[in-house]
Image: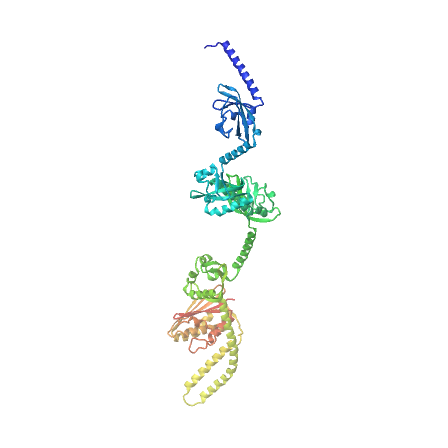
Amino acid sequence: MNIGYGNEMEYKQEILKLNKQIEGFLNIFNSMPEPYIRVDEELWITYVNDAACALLETSKDQLVSMKITDDVIPLNIQEEFGTPKNPGESERQMIQLHTGALKQIEFIPIGAPSEGQQFYRLRDVTLDLSSSRETRMSRQMFLDIFDTAIESIVLFDGSGIIMEVNHAFIHIMGIPKKEIVGKNMRDLISPDYKGYWDESIQRAFAESNFKGEVEIMIGVEPHHFTFSISSTVGNELYMSVLRRITESNLIEKKLETSERIFAELFDQSMDAIIFWNDDGIIFRVNQSACKIFESNREELIGSYIWKYVYSNKHHFGQMMETFDRDTQVRGELIYKMPNNQIKLLELTAKKHEGDGYNVTIFRNVSERWLIEKELRDREKKFRKIFEGTLDGLILWNHEGFTDINEAGQKILEISKRKLLSLSVKEFIEKIPGNAPALNAHIENVYKHEVYSSIIPITFEDGRVKHIEFLTRKNLYSNLNLSIFRDVSKNLEMQEQIRKSDTLNVVGELAAGIAHEIRNPMTALKGFIQLLEDGVKGDFSTYFHVITSEIKRIETIITEFLVLAKPQALKVFKQDVHTILRETLELLAAQALLENIQFETDFEEEEFKVLCEANQLKQVFINIIKNALEVMPDGGSVRIKTTRFSEKYVCISITDQGMGISTEKLKKLGEPFYTTKDRGTGLGLMVSYKIIEEHNGYIEVESEVDIGTSFHIYLPFK
């Protein structure tokens, strides 16, 4: 059908007119004070006015998109709702709104249905309900809530017999309702919780309500539930509302517990704990932090974490660089507190980038710092004493050596590095000859805790040092301390003192003997000569023996006199070589008879010393004559002179005799000690005394079956 332009315009105008009329009717309908709704044949709501929305407490958009039997207006008995049985007949229904409120609504049809649509006027008749109706509806509502509740609900009597359960409890148990109702509640409780459940019932009866946790057997597995028990249901029943604790519930509970434990640990921790953001601003502190930083929470929160750093900014900068790079750092910093107190704090900082916070744990180590400083000072003092003492010091235990001072290295002639690389056993056995005495010393140390002894230590070149050891067991830290010194010179000095004392005694004795014997000897000598001339017969042999022995006695008396009193020395600068040559000329005849040759080795042309020539000649005669007498089979005697340390001339007289043992060598120079059959021992004693008066000294070297060397040292000045 074709509609012309004019007709089309009229058609549109007509439509606009109708729309305006509809809009007007709707405005009138919407503004009516009484609530109206319109439904179709299938009970879909097609229109509501504002008063109906207010009555049903639901928006217009929600109402026009659902049936009148939907959950928006849940009727108690939905199957009874429908169009009126007789036209014009109204119907009342109890409905529960989304808000939970209950209303009694009367549905009054308006006119006859038109094109499948029916209008209803609604009227709230809740206040008109009778008390019986209210009771019935209340009970019905309780049953609805009971059955639709999410939590499991169980009703049981005083003996524990289950009277009613809701769908939630049936669903959890997984068995039909008829298998639950009639059972005793205790039959469902885990054996471990039966006693607790009985106690809960008693407390619920006494307190009207009780809450707790219990295990319920579902099949053969126990499951954890929280529960509450009320004893006021119908004044004769108990109602228990149970909620199963799922894994998420357990996690939440653990999180709550963890948070509570964290809070307790955080506040009660002895270490200071500070939380701060990426800008360095503190936002949470514990009580220990307030105590360490001498501040309250209000002063710390909001301040900067590095506010109290006191010194060594460079070290602090390095720590911050490490923190930014590694997201964690550990170290120590010195802090100045608001009360000007200086503290050393040990800290551990950790960055939590994702969570937007950082945490630092502080510990006050000022006391340890002071103790360590004091220990370092003591260590320095000990080190100064240890290194500065003139005696050798060694710290050692059964595992090895820990330390040795510089004096000890010089005495033992070993470096610290070398000694520390050796075990005690290796050091002792390095030269086997030292082992017995050193092992005996160590055994006595462990036996007596403190022990001292003088041990002759032999070195690799054969030299021997007499070392006095004083060792204390377990001085500290399971270390033993040995203090030692070289007493070789002391022993020599003691030996010289002993010899000097002997000389003094011998001198005093010699003076007396010489005085008492010399005069009688003179008389004896004279009368013997007279007797020799006057006696007839050949007694020459006897007189010769008597005369020679008297001369021998005179010689001894003369030597006694040398020892008895100091000799007045008249010293002059004289050449040692000249004195030696004159001595050798005197002894040349005896040497020739003994088939002995003299060998001389003079390093320089002359060695002039201040001396008394005759006394030196006597020394040389005594020593060379001894050399001749110990070589019965002939040989050679070597006389050598050398310059020694620019201060002395050394005259060495060496023979090829049988030599002297070490034990006998120590006694040389003692009065009346001799290795010869008819010797007095006074010759060497006089020689030692003469050289001593010339400010010199004598050393003797000897090897058995090889020979003996006397080294005489005389000073140039």
Q: Quadrant of residue 135?
A: top right
Q: Quadrant of residue 302?
A: top right
Q: Residue at x 58, y 21 (%)?
A: 32
Q: How many marks?
A: 0
Q: Residue furthest right?
A: 339
Q: Residue at x 58, y 49 (%)?
A: 343
Residue 244 shows in the view: no
Where is residue 508? Give x, y as percent: 53, 77
Q: Residue furthest bottom?
A: 536
Along the line of sight, the residue nearer the viewer: 93 or 431: 93
Along the line of sight, the residue nearer the viewer: 54 or 331: 54
Residue 288 shows in the view: yes
Where is residue 651? Give x, y as percent: 46, 68
Q: Residue furthest left?
A: 633
Vertical comparison of 511 with 188: above or below: below
Vertical comparison of 256 with 426: above or below: above
Along the line of sight, the residue nearer the viewer: 328 or 253: 253
Q: How is the image coloured?
A: rainbow
Where is residue 442? Give x, y as percent: 46, 64
Where is residue 283? Give x, y as percent: 57, 41
Vertical comparison of 476 with 230: above or below: below
Vertical comparison of 612 with 126: above or below: below
Query: Left or right: where does residue 453 sit relative to residue 593?
Result: right
Quadrant occupied by the N terminus: top left
